[in-house]
Image (spheres, grey):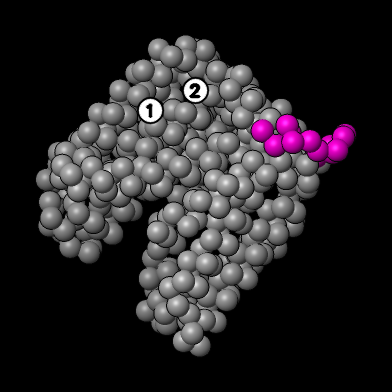
Amino acid sequence: MVGLVQFVPSALLVFAAGHAADRYDRKRVAQICQIAEALIAAVLAWGTFAGWLTAPQIFASLTLLGITAAFEGPASSALLPGVVPEGSLQRATAISSGAFQAAAISGPALGGLAYAIAPGAPYVLMAACSLLVGLLSGMIRLQGAVTPKRPPTFDDLFAGVRFVRDNPAILGTISLDLFAVLLGGATALLPIYAHDILQTGPWGLGVLRAAPAAGALLMTAVIARHAIKRRVGLRMFQAVIIFGLATVVFALSQLIWLSVLALAVMGAADMVSVVIRTSLVQLATPDAMRGRVGAVNFLFINASNQLGQFESGLTAALLGAMPAAMLGGVGTVAVALLWMKLFPSLRNVERLE
């Protein structure tokens, strides 16, 4: 339910959000959403400290967060090409993704420490961080602003879908992400692996959760220093295949060190794929369309993350955790091989330029 109440408003508003990112100042759209998130977190903190916060009110707050995420995602993703020098998008994407992974490692730890102080403290921390992000967003200097030449039309809302459909490389990139993540959601099963298979307890679960982000951070450092310059389309497919094979290793492993290594490889391979996919979509999309195309991409990513966890949990309930994770890894490899045949233009992309 927590995932659902955030995903539904994102899915319903994604096209309007993409249009807003292309028609209005993207920096301001993102900034408004970030300040709204700070206010929502402040209300959650107030309700927790005062003792009146209930489960329905938490779900209502999460719905509002889903609405802000729907508008913030396309606007934020469309900002990146406008703030980096020409030819540096791949490195900038790697650094941006690496920052996200660093937050993925440190965020839960900070939240746990704050909760140890008081149950409402994590909300206070979220409110402060969101407000800081909103202030920092206002300091961004863009190379060019979006200046629409005519009034919006209904067709403009769905122009991103048509653009993606008519560009095989972008369609292949976004759909590959959807199905690969949908099938490769083995990380949703980490609590089961830590408790029942590896028998490591809470400390082991913490190490397992941190392993993919650690691998992604190491790969970020490599890509930021040594950009992928040749055969980037093939490298993307290879990274997805390695991700799937590492998922199979993790699924079958009963040794904590091997599981951690497999998860780190999964994180590193996913980082390569994310950097190439994001750069390909941004470079192949005109600036005036980046918000609407980013909205389609945002919807696919959200769907794959939420539905991937649901798929892994459902399969684990039916077949067991180990078969579910293994089938997900094998399915990821199969999707990558099939997409190489269906989208030869994507496989043959030589450079990010």
Percent of width and height locating residue 70: 59, 50
- Looking at the image, which residue is at 64% across and 60% down? 34
Percent of width and height locating residue 323: 16, 38
Mark 1: few/some/many CA within 10 Å (<14, 14-19, 20+)? many
Q: Residue 330 is drawn in which quadrant?
A: top left
Can residue 264 be spotted in the picture? no
Q: Is residue 187 left or right of residue 73?
A: left
What type is the residue that disc 2 sits on? Gly
Check disc 2 and report the residue beneath it: 172
Report the front residue among 223 and 80: 80
- Looking at the image, which residue is at 49% across and 22% down? 172
Percent of width and height locating residue 145: 81, 41
Q: Is residue 154 left or right of residue 349?
A: right
Percent of width and height locating residue 229: 53, 21
From the viewer's perspective, is residue 290 above or below residue 352?
A: below
Q: Earlier in the sequence, mark 2 or mark 1?
A: 2
Span shown in magenta: 146-158
Figure quadrant of the C terminus = top right
From the viewer's perspective, is residue 345 above or below residue 96?
A: above
- The image's mark for residue 84 is none
Q: Residue 273 is drawn in which quadrant?
A: top left
What type is the residue that disc 1 sits on? Ala
From the viewer's perspective, is residue 344 above or below residue 286?
A: above
Q: Is residue 222 left or right of residue 198?
A: right
Q: Main secondary structure of the magenta part?
A: loop
Q: Residue 258 is drawn in which quadrant?
A: top left
Q: Secondary structure at mark 1?
A: helix
Report the front residue among 122 and 338: 338
Q: Is residue 284 left or right of residue 221?
A: right
